[in-house]
Image (cartoon, helix red, strand yellow):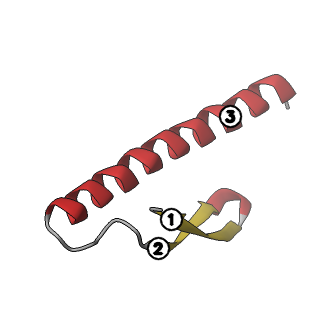
């Protein structure tokens, strides 16, 4: 196993997930605010599940998205 390749691929994957997730959350908040569905001071429970079937990995991460 090449540690450098392994670590770079993990960082690349996590960066893609982080950037894409942030973009989707921002779009959803903007859309909900424009529709009047939220006030803009809420906090929302959020969860992400990381799955790598080939490794038998499935782990859930929970947190909150706070608007104010």
Residue 53, visible in the rendered structure: yes
User: Which residue lies at the image location 48% right of the left edge and 40% below the top edge?
Assistant: 19
From this view, report whether residue 44 is shown above or below residue 7.
below
Label 2's element?
A: strand
Measure the alpha-carbon separation of dots 3 and 2.
27 Å
Circles 2 and 1, Cβ within 8 Å, touching? The answer is yes
Mark 2 closeness class: few <14, some 14–19, many ≥20 residues within 10 Å? few
Observer-side mark, 2 or 1, equals 1
Labels 3 and 2: the sequence-earlier one: 3
User: Which residue lies at the image location 61% right of the left edge and 32% below the top edge?
Assistant: 12
The spot of residue 32 in percent (x, y) is: 23, 65
Circles 1 and 3, Cβ within 8 Å, touching? The answer is no
| Left or right, residue 63 beside residue 67 | right
Mark 1 closeness class: few <14, some 14–19, many ≥20 residues within 10 Å? few
Measure the alpha-carbon separation of dots 2 and 1.
6 Å
From this view, report whether residue 14 is shown above or below residue 60.
above
- The residue that label 1 is drawn on is 66
- The residue that label 2 is drawn on is 44
Measure the alpha-carbon separation of dots 1 and 3.
26 Å
From this view, report whether residue 62 is shown above or below residue 33.
below
| Left or right, residue 28 beside residue 5 | left
| Residue 11, label in figure | 3
Labels 1 and 3: the sequence-earlier one: 3
Observer-side mark, 1 or 3, equals 1
Circles 3 and 2, Cβ within 8 Å, touching? The answer is no
The spot of residue 57 in percent (x, y) is: 71, 65
Labels 2 and 1: the sequence-earlier one: 2
């Amino acid at each position: 196993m090449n540690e450098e390749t392994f670590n770079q691929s993990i960082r690349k994957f996590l960066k893609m997930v982080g950037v894409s997730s942030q973009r989707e959350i921002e779009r959803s908040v903007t859309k909900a605010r424009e529709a009047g569905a939220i006030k803009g001071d809420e906090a929302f429970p959020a969860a992400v599940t990381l799955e790598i079937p080939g490794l038998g990995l499935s782990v859930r991460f929970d947190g909150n998205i706070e608007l104010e």
